[in-house]
Image: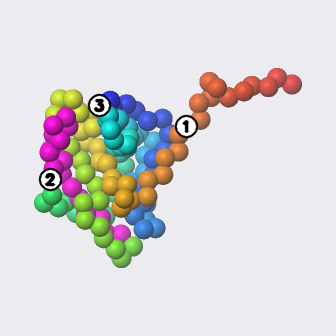
Amino acid sequence: MAIEPFSGTVTVRFSDAIVAATERAKVLREDGHEPVFYIPFEDIYFDLFEKTDTTTRCPLKGTASYWRVHAVGSSSDDFMWAYETPDAAALAIAGHGAFDPEKARIDVDPAEDKRHTPHIVE
């Protein structure tokens, strides 16, 4: 498992509503799984969320808590999860939430790497 800062913008939508947006995401890569983007709590619109009783346990990250989203007249259970007190290997995602890609629209826009942009001298 590897957790590293993501250079770029991550925007999360439910229906037509933006429920989170950040330029400070972290990406978690785990063998056998798609990368997961974690967004700082400060960049999540928590007024649209309600914590549920759902929890799951991961042997690497710890116990995850889940939230229901309410927006644009709709709701979806267990839309977001977070490791509020993660195990040692996952401390970098404390204070961050991730979103179910089957329920959320997650737009990822990597920052332009200016080191590899051709420079033309006229």
Residue that mark 2 sits on: 55
Please tell me whether residue 108 belongs to the stretch shown in magenta: no
Image coords of residue 48 (percent x, y): 31, 64
Please name the residue shown 14% across and 53% down the image: 55
Task: Please name the residue that numbered disc 3 is placed on.
Answer: 1
Magenta-colored stretch includes residue 60: yes
Q: Nearer the viewer, residue 43 or 32?
A: 32
Q: Residues under labels 3 and 1: Cα distance? A: 23 Å
Disc 2 secondary structure class: strand
Helix, strand, or loop for circle 1? loop
Q: Amino acid at mark 1?
A: Ala
68 on left or right of 53 = right
Asked if one can make out residue 18 in the rendered structure from this viewpoint, the answer is yes
- Can I make out residue 86 in this image? no
- What amino acid is labelled 3 in the image? Met
Task: Kindly report which numbered mark, 2 or 1, lies closer to the viewer in this rendering.
Answer: 2
Query: How many C-alpha atoms fall within 10 Å of the one at disc 3: few (<14), some, or many (≥20)?
Result: few
> Which region shows up in magenta?
55-71
| Numbered label attached to residue 111 | 1
Coloration mode: rainbow
* SS state under label 3: loop
Tell me the CA gap for discs 2 and 1. Answer: 34 Å
Q: In the displayed orientation, state which residue is furthest to the front.
A: 32
Choose top left, top right, bottom left or bottom right for residue 54: bottom left
Q: Residue at x 14, y 45 (%)?
A: 57
